[in-house]
Structure formats: C-alpha cells, structure tokens
Image (cartoon, helix red, strand yellow):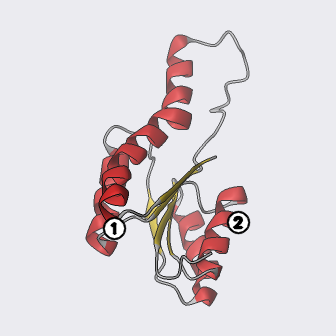
C-alpha cells in the first residue's frame, strides 16, 4: 500500500470493521490511532496492534461531544505532528429504531454519523493539501 510510517486515525477503531481497518493499516506499517468511548476497548485494541511494531496510540473519547473532534485532532498533532490517513468509522443507531423519533434524537444521530466526519475532514484536509498527500475514507 505504500503507507509505512504514515499516521492513520481510525475513529471507532477498536472493534468490528474499524479494528479490521486499523489492523490492516498497522500490518502495512502505518502508525495507527484508534478511538473509543471505552478505555477497555482502547487498551485491548492497542494490545493486539502491538505485534506490528508500529507507533500506535489510543484515545478514549465521546467524539460526538462539543469540541471533542478538535481535542482528538490536537492530541494527535501533539503526539505525531500530522495525520496522513483518516478513516471516519464512528457510528451507532443510538437505539433510535423509530422513524418517528424526536428531532433531538435525529440531530444526535446526524452529529454522530455525519457531523463528526465533517469536522475531522475539515481539520485534516489542510495538512493533507500542504503535504500533497492524504487519504480520507468515510464508512
């Protein structure tokens, strides 16, 4: 893939498809940052990624909270100074199964699925443009 030593952020990267993506990136030599709301999931993912001998990092965050995408981005910039690859994988139904749920529920779901991705994209795109290299994947 040609991503050795690239820095990759995978939101929701501690389980399921997110972890599979994180593992594939680490296997190719990328330094992977994973996020989750649960510390145990972050710790477990980092433990499993250790075998790839890459510089991996975990952030415990409820990324839908106000300013959390910016906080996550700033933490990565302090640790790595860049983001080369962004995988927007965070998602949930928030137990909203009723199509006639409240407007507030729809706004929370919209924020989780699309709002966070837009914020993170806006934070990393200037870096990627400056370097003339970057990849963004929206799941």
Work out whether mark 2 precedes mark 1 in sequence or the reverse, and give the earlier one: 2
Q: Quadrant of residue 102?
A: top right
Query: Do callouts 2 and 1 mark residues in contact (Cβ within 8 Å)?
Result: no
Decide which of 87, 106 is in the foreground and name it: 87
Decide which of 109, 1 is in the foreground and name it: 1
Give the CA separation, mark 2 to mark 1.
Answer: 22 Å
In the rendered image, residue 89, in percent from the top left (x then y), is placed at: 59, 50
Viewport quadrant of the N terminus: bottom right
Residue pictured at 33% horizontal, 73% vertical = 80
Residue designated by label 1: 82
Residue pictured at 61% horizontal, 42% vertical = 91
Secondary structure state at the residue bearing disc 1? loop
Q: Crowding near pointer 2: few (<14 within 10 Å), some, many (20+)?
A: few
Q: Disc number at residue 69? A: none
Q: Crowding near pointer 1: few (<14 within 10 Å), some, many (20+)?
A: some
Residue pictured at 50% horizontal, 17% vertical = 104
Secondary structure state at the residue bearing disc 2? helix
Q: Quadrant of residue 22?
A: bottom right
In the displayed structure, does residue 33 sit left or right of residue 1?
A: left
Decide which of 88, 111 is in the foreground and name it: 88
Q: Quadrant of residue 44?
A: bottom right
Q: Does residue 3 lie above or below 107 as drawn? A: below
Residue designated by label 2: 20
Residue pictured at 31% horizontal, 42% vertical = 67
Eye-nearest disc, 2 or 1: 1
In the rendered image, residue 105, in percent from the top left (x then y), is placed at: 55, 20
In the displayed structure, does residue 77 sit left or right of residue 25?
A: left
């Amino acid at each position: 893939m040609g991503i050795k030593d690239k820095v990759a952020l995978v939101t929701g990267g501690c389980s399921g498809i997110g972890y599979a993506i994180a593992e594939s990136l680490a296997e190719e030599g990328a330094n992977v940052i994973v996020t989750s709301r649960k510390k145990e999931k972050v710790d477990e993912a980092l433990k499993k990624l250790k075998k790839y001998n890459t510089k991996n990092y975990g952030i415990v965050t409820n990324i839908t909270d106000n300013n959390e995408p910016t906080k996550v981005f700033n933490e990565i910039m302090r640790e790595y100074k860049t983001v080369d690859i962004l995988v927007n994988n965070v998602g949930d139904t928030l137990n909203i199964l009723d199509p006639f749920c409240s407007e507030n529920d729809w706004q929370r779901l919209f924020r989780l699925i699309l709002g966070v991705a837009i914020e993170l994209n806006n934070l990393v795109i200037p870096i990627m443009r400056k370097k003339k290299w970057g990849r963004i994947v929206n799941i």
